[in-house]
Amino acid sequence: MKRAIPAFVAALLLVSCSASAPTPSLEDYQTDVNLFAVQDEVRILQMTDIHWSVGTDFDKEEKYLRALVAKADPDIVMVTGDSVLTGARRDWTELRETLDTLKNSRGRSVYWGLTYGNHDRQGDYKVEDVDSWIKEYSEASSYDVTKESRHHGLYKNPADEVQGRSNYVVNLKDGEGNTLWQLYALDTNSDYYHDGGYTYDVIRENQIDWFKKISASTRKEGGPLIPGLAFFHIPLYQTIYSYDAATGTKTLPEGDFGGALNESKANLPQLEDKVTNPDSLRVYVGYKDTGFFDVARENGIKGMFYGHDHANDFWAVYQDVLLAYGTKTGEGLSYRKGLIGGNLITVHKDGSFDQRRKEGGDFEQILLSEEDL
């Protein structure tokens, strides 16, 4: 015999169902910035692995970040994870307020976004709190560069079922409302229990599905792919394959790669028989290749930028996509002497950018000296 549900239980169920968040629209993940309405190029500075913590000298670190921005002169800053390590609310407060008050040489405020790294979830706070703190500075769905805004954040994280907390896209528009470039942020998540132990996580399959939907929705029906860049924290397996193609099989042409892998070798037995040069394993990847590289390449992504491995600054044009480590930003946690600063990426109104790193080029390494710390 069926039992009747007590009235108060039924009421709770009704409230629970009615209070559940609606499925966000694809527009909820997007921020429009009409930079191409007033200029022919957009300069994007990648910072990574800042690692502010309870022991950080904020005055010193803020001066360093402002010196880096003064040298790079960007329109946008993208921070690719590990902004904080074993920190507290003050670390996030100082970071967001510093980023939100940056100015470039053109007198304009610098827009900024960030992705989560594996260490950002470690601290005296809940990750939900971090989400709300960053959202306070990222409420706008669009920015008009000819008008001053209260805040300048680009971060989005609507309540959804997509894995991670920093999956969103920035649409760089012209004066007619056309999207000329897109900047994708993705969460590579944190640690993953796999085969009896913990390893790094990955861009998951439902994030890839989300990426495909966003990419399809933002281009005109029957129109060409919109060129894009992707920013995330943990490198992809293709970093290993491209390094091996550059230094092992030597099938990657000279001029299509540069920099170095300086980290110690990662424990990657599943890949040892797949590379010619064992130094290719100086990359700390997640537990598997989820196929994001191929999907991104097929949907217009021209460059991918990440961090995680502080001593590495290798880059390569692999299968027509730029794969590039960010340059470690600041002295937080650890850094390689002479290798601190950021990457500057310049994209143009005609859809072009130079994928090969060179001083004064469309993709260049901005280094500061240790005296700047």
Image (spheres, rainbow, N blue to C red):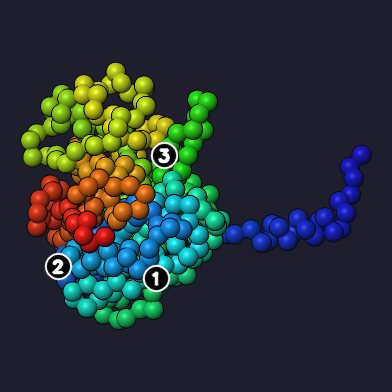
The amino acid type, in three-letter code, at marker 2 is Asp
Residue matched to label 2: 40
- Do the numbered discs 1 and 2 sit on residues whose CB atoms are within 8 Å? no
Label 1: how many Cα within 10 Å (few below 14, some 14–19, many 20+)? some
Label 3: how many Cα within 10 Å (few below 14, some 14–19, many 20+)? many
Q: Secondary structure at mark 1?
A: helix
Residue matched to label 3: 202
Q: Earlier in the sequence, mark 3 or mark 2?
A: 2
Where does residue 128 sit, x and y in percent of width and height?
55, 58
Mark 3–mark 2 distance (CA, rounded to whole Å): 35 Å
Q: Nearer the viewer, mark 1 or mark 2?
A: 1
Seen at 89% across and 49% down, the residue is: 4
Mark 1–mark 3 distance (CA, rounded to whole Å): 29 Å
Q: Nearer the viewer, mark 1 or mark 3?
A: 1
The amino acid type, in three-letter code, at marker 1 is Glu
Seen at 35% across and 68% down, the residue is: 59
- Counting every numbered tag in the picture gives 3
State left or right for residue 298 relative to residue 210.
left
Q: Nearer the viewer, mark 3 or mark 2?
A: 3
Seen at 73% across and 61% down, the residue is: 15
Q: Secondary structure at mark 2?
A: loop
Residue matched to label 1: 97
